[in-house]
Image (spheres, rainbow, N blue to C red):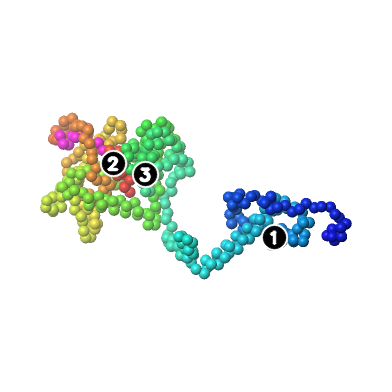
Amino acid sequence: MEHLEEGHNKRALPSAPVLSRVLPPPALRREFPLPPAILREWAPPPPLLRELAPPSARLRGLAPPLSPARAYLRSAAAEGAASGAASAAASRAAQKRSTTDAGLLSSHWAGLDDIWRPVVDVQFDVVVGISSSYQFFMLREGEVLARPYSCWCPACFDVATAGPGQDARLAPYAGYKVVGCTRAGSAFYEWSNKSCRAKTGGEAGSPDLRARTHGHALAASLAPVGGQWVLVEAYGDDKDELWLGKTLAFGGFNARPPRCSKKHTGQQANKFTTSFNNGDYMVAVQWYERLCESGDGERLEFVMGERQVDVINSTELRLAGFALAPIGVLPAGVTDGIESASVSEEERVKWRLARGDEAEALTWCR
């Protein structure tokens, strides 16, 4: 440096480059800013900051030109230091007060003990074969269908995208087969029912509570004179999930005139071979039986069963007040393959249940 001042070395050094020539233009820096967290992480230690510090005004003309990388690092270090200081200031302010207002938004700084968490973790059934299945179909809370391979043919697409009440579904009694699937003959595209129900915690009773509440609401809306179709959950039936019945006025409820339902109040009691708790409804129905065969194999055709009144609990109701269409009459003396000379014409009428109605009722099952 002394030699330079004495004039022993007069070679010209290039002037320091203008910062705008090294860094991206300001417009580009505004469009692609570095996140503050990255700037803080990239901020060099103080010794390196001193090393990268710009030369003094006296030596500025003698400083070698900055490389693009060094110039960018210097800029990033400055931004990181500023961002770190701002973050530290915000943290100190948060410790003084729990709520910080920012315009129209408000955030609450909560500690670990401020958030309530359940004492017992909820445990669920393990979905067997989940890692080897690649397509799933949620039936209802706690039940999901799975199959090894995915199929998005038009028939499968319609079933997968149809909601409750639509004219497409997967029938349990038909093995959850998709009618019209282009890969129906392969075992890799067969659905199987899996359980994912909660076994512990409050969620374990959620499906039952949901079904009971829905059944009570349906019973309260029934017409007193009867004559309405109802779908009832076939609890404990290994073959069917739903039974079809029609409400009818029943004199056993000691009401004048007779009515099809009555609300039970008081303690738990057994009536008509059925248990009722406070708030449950007693509902009188006439059952209809599924025919053994239908034209499309879906078993959606019904005929009146043995003529008798059965009283059920409203907690099993899943759908009520829908319409059924008569589709014909069985030959005289024959009902569901059983010959009987005393069967009336009313008992020989065949009724067809809409797939959408059955699908909606299934969504309310446990």
User: Camera-side residue: 18 or 102?
Assistant: 18
Q: Residue at x 68, y 60 (%)?
A: 45
Q: Does the magenta stretch include residue 350?
A: yes
Q: Mark 3 points at which residue?
A: 139
N-term-proximal mark, 3 vs 1: 1
Q: Position of residue 59 (x, y in %)?
A: 77, 59
Residue 265 location, quadrant: bottom left
Task: From the viewer's perspective, tell me whether residue 220 is left or right of residue 22.
Answer: left
Task: From the viewer's perspective, tell me whether residue 147 is left or right of residue 212.
Answer: right
Q: Is residue 135 above or below residue 11?
A: above
Q: Residue 357 carries which label?
A: 2
N-term-proximal mark, 3 vs 2: 3
Tag 2 secondary structure: helix
- Asked if the residue at tag 1 contacts the one at tag 2, i.e. Cβ–Cβ closer than 8 Å, the answer is no
Tag 3 secondary structure: strand
Alpha-carbon span between mark 3 and mark 1: 62 Å
Give the magenta-colored segment's residue range.
345-353
Asked whether the viewer can see residue 264, the reply is yes
Q: Where is residue 115 in the image (x, y as percent from the top left)?
A: 45, 62
Amino acid carrying label 2: it is: Asp
Alpha-carbon span between mark 2 and mark 1: 74 Å
**Mark 1 burial class by Cα count in 10 Å: few <14, some 14-19, many 20+:** some
Front tag of 3 and 1:
1
Q: Mark 1 points at which residue?
A: 49
Q: Where is residue 145 in the image (x, y as percent from the top left)?
A: 40, 42
User: Camera-side residue: 318 or 292?
Assistant: 318
Q: Which residue is drawn at 52% across and 69% down?
A: 96
